[in-house]
Amino acid sequence: MKTTILYPSLALLAAAAAVVIVPVEAAAESCSVPPSGAMSLADSRDDVYVSRWCADQSKIDMLWNGLSLDADLWDEGWGYDNVCDPQLFLPRLLNAAFNVTKVQEISRHFGENNAPARRLWWDFIKEREDDGYEPKCCNDEPGLNAAHFSGGLSTNLCIKWGYKIGAAVRSSTLVHEATHEDEGHVGDDECSNGASCDTYYGAYNANTMQINYLYDAVSAYQIETVNGKPQRKVTRFTTGGAEMCAYIPLWTDAERDGGIDQISYRINNNFASGSVFPKYSDVDDVDDAYGASWACANCEVGKYTFSLQNLGKNKACNEIANKANAGVNAANRALCTSFNGKIAKAPGAAAYQTLANELYLATKPCLSYNQADLDAYCSAQQATAKTVADLDPYGILADNGFQEELECTADYCRDRFDPAWSSHANEPTWDDPLGCLDMLCDDDTECRRRFLVYKADPAKYHPDHCTDVLLDCIEASPQQAQRSPQLWRDGLSPALKVDAVSASCQSSYQFCRATEEIARRVAAMVLIERWTVPGPGPVEDLRTNPRINPVDQAFRQALLRLGARLKAGLGEAQFTAELAALMRHPEAMAATFDAGPATFAALFGQKDFTAIVGPQLARISPSLAAVERVPAAKALLGKLNAARVSYTKLGAQQVQKTLQDASRELSPAQFEGLIKALGQASTPAEVEAALAKASP
């Protein structure tokens, strides 16, 4: 073939649509090119396909040689000297061949089940059509597209075929004609169309092969090589607000519809017998069959960027509650970015879902709060806050840890307590200018009074059970000291009587505290054993469990952390102090009750905590079964029982009676010494040692 090639510009290709009709000769025939009724370039898309190969001589040679064309048959105006002109017949034949090569590139990997083995359509044509093709006017046979001849004769291609059938669907005729090298048609009168008739669909014949090729072509989606393997290309788009992915069809939807129409026509008209339905009625059927589009929402990288303004509104981990979450967020942004790059190469909904699952599994969970980081945040807020409302405007303390917001507010209010506030102790509705009373006590008048009386000491206005009993006892001391004066030694000063009553309150408090300290220790051991889960880490993340109250969750995590620190070497005294601080809150006792009502009743009794856990406490049957399943906790039961006996024996009233008797038997100096010793006693043993001196 001559190597003369024209390289048209886009302007030239566009101008070709208005080319002047030129008469050409074909074996003593004369016909106009393009013929009357020819498709426009916009419809046939010959200009598009020509632009994909005409600038590459190797592609031209591949197509020319693959069709075994003869230069003598394609010169004289048919296009041999200008293969880049889409208005000429030869470029249109090469367009058909080019389409077959592109279908084979895909069908060899992704073809219809009823296509021939390996689906190598271009190879199929090359092996059979070694006699080439010849252009014909076909003036005497206006309905004919092509005619195949055996015995060394080339296949005739009618002018109609090149101009009245689009380039994509036109390619199927090459498969049809190549099959005739092996199989001819049966009698034309056996088919409803009266021509091109074969036995039945599914047998090896020209119409079956043409249909199978078209099935491959209309279901061909562009491919690419990823990691050394071919896969369908994916495009991403948004429709109706939904992010979608789809395969990219080889042909346009109009071309695919044309192929489906051709399949339907041939199945219905070109077979003598047999009855089958076309597999597809339109391109949507094809795409549905191949799952060619699917939802493929991307991963929004920005949702893993932390800011106070977006706190709780996106997926970013809290970098204030735990500074190490900055690394978690960075890692998740990287995973997110990688995922977005991969889904553009993920062929199909299943592949997308696989990537989505991998992303889900790889996404790092947020780290729970770090106590030091929370404390640092609290301190920073305290330094700038003008009122308690400024301490936690974003709820960081409220949402992390157990009672962190309360503790931070309590420290803030104690540091800024104005002694002048105490004058309002008997005004239940008075509010301080910092908002402390509203935040810490709400409408609890007893809490408000004690906040003001005890100068914002949280152990006094939010007391545990024993401290509450102690304060009630001490606050009633002046009145109690004036009762039954005959029980005291004559001449004993009122002040000393009050001191004696207060000392009995303090003494009883030591026994109460010792008893509850053991009970709390036992309860904590049972809960830690119950809540600890196998696997790495001391804390189970239960924040997403809707069945667990958020306050209970926070208490559970705090207790498990404390238990983990004890195992790691935390001293007993420190553990006891921190456990007491943790369980001082009514919410902690309520959570302990919720976790094991029968155990709670057995350890703490059924009357002292009714105000916290509710009247149902009185109806619970106490049981130590859960305690007995934890050896270390069971070992403390004897000590707990002994403490209870001492508490019962040396309650406030019993100690007060002992002191009344002592006031009559001891000298004033001895009695004052006894009261002083009791006031200094900090353990039950020291109380008992002091009371041993109550008799002369």
Image (tube, rainbow, N blue to C red):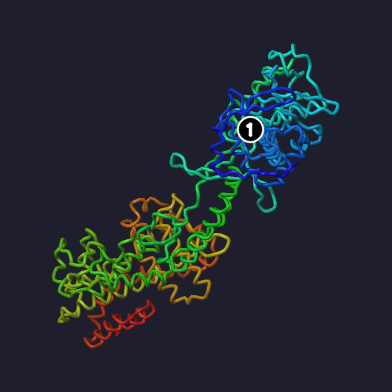
What residue do we see at 37% from left, 53% from top? 617
Say which quadrant the N terminus sits in: top right
Rendered view: 183 above or below 590: above
281 vs 669, left or right, is right
What residue do we see at 14% from left, 66% from top? 426
Rendered view: 372 above or below 529: below
Is residue 119 among what the camera can see?
no
Rendered view: 609 above or below 28: below
The quarter holding residue 394 reads bottom left
Percent position of residue 470, x then y: 28, 70
Residue that lies at the very extreme toward the top in this rendered image: 189
Is residue 301 among what the camera can see?
yes
10 vs 474, left or right, is right
Q: Amino acid at mark 1?
A: Ala
What residue do we see at 59% from left, 23% from top? 36
Query: Which structural element holds mark 1?
Result: helix
558 vs 212, left or right, is left
The quarter holding residue 420 reads bottom left
Percent position of residue 114, x then y: 73, 30
Between 116 and 312, the one lying in front of the other is 116
380 vs 164, left or right, is left
Percent position of residue 152, x then y: 85, 29
Between 506 and 52, the one lying in front of the other is 52
Classify mark 1: residues with Cα within 10 Å, few (<14), some (14-19) or many (20+): many
Give the labeled residue for mark 1.
167
